[in-house]
Structures are given as C-alpha cells and as structure tokens.
Image: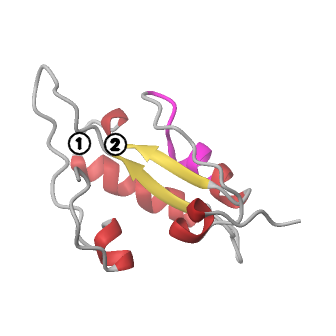
Amino acid sequence: MVLETKITKLFGIRHPIIQGGMHYVGYAGLAAAVANAGGLGLVTALTQPTPEALAAEIKKAQGLLKPGCEGAVGVNLTILPMFSEVDYGELHGVTRSYTELHGVTRSYTE
C-alpha cells in the first residue's frame, strides 16, 4: 500500500518520511539509507568542515543510491543565527534549490 501525500508529491518520494538534519550524524550513509527506503534522507551541511567536503559527501550519498531508488537525498543547511558565519561555498552542479526543481517563485517566509 502506497500512502500518497503532499510531501510524497512535493519531493518525489515513496513514503512521507523526512530524516531530520542531525549534526555529527547526518552523513552520506544515513541519508542514502533513508532514501533507499523511500524517504527523504538529509546530509547535514554543518557537519562537514569545508564546502568541498560537503560537495564530496553529497556526491557520496548520491553514489550510494540503489537503482530505482524511490526516495531522495537532500541537504540540511543551517540558516539560524550562529556565533560565527558558515560558508557553504559554491555548490553549483551538486545541489539544486527547491525553486529550480519545482518552478516555485514565492518566498519561504510568506
């Protein structure tokens, strides 16, 4: 039985399960396992020491996806106020924003 919800349609996943972004835990292996089970797995950006390491972790997660995977891999970016600024660098070609994937032009703060 497949449960179709706004979340499954929005992210193109089989099950309405989203892995939380977890500092020191959200690595490629966990994100890919959640995606391979049909949910949305998240690589936690803040866990990576550099933008280059983050890009490598995202590629690693994508490489761990099984053929016909019914889930997806995303990236959890920390946007809350921090003691020091986080530089996620240029990730063009590695990640796509929600607006690029779905053509949405409205602000997330509305």
Residue placed furthest toward the front: 110
**Please, what is the three-letter code of the amino acid marked with disc 2?**
Ala
Does the magenta segment cover residue 17?
no
Q: Mark 2, mark 1: which one is toward the viewer?
A: 2
Mark 1 Cα-neighbour bin, 10 Å: few <14, some 14–19, many ≥20: some
For label 2, the residue is: 45
Q: Which colour scheme is used?
A: secondary structure
Q: How far apart are marks 2 and 1 (CA)?
A: 9 Å
SS class of the residue under badge 1?
Answer: loop
Q: Residue 50 carries which label?
A: 1
Residue placed furthest toward the right: 1
Name the residue: 42% across, 57% down.
Answer: 58
* Image vertical order of residue 102 relative to residue 11, above or below: below
Q: Is residue 42 left or right of residue 101?
A: right
Residue nearest the viewer, comparing 11 with 29: 11
Quarter of the image that includes the N terminus: bottom right
* Image vertical order of residue 86 relative to residue 18, above or below: above
Q: In this view, does 93 lie to the left or right of 41?
A: left
Query: In the image, residue 40 lies at what x, y percent?
Result: 57, 55
Query: In the image, residue 42 lies at what x, y percent?
Result: 49, 48
Residue nearest the viewer, comparing 110 with 2: 110
Magenta range: 24-32
On the question of residue 52 being in view, the answer is yes
Name the residue: 16% across, 60% down.
Answer: 90
Q: In this view, does 3 lie to the left or right of 29?
A: right
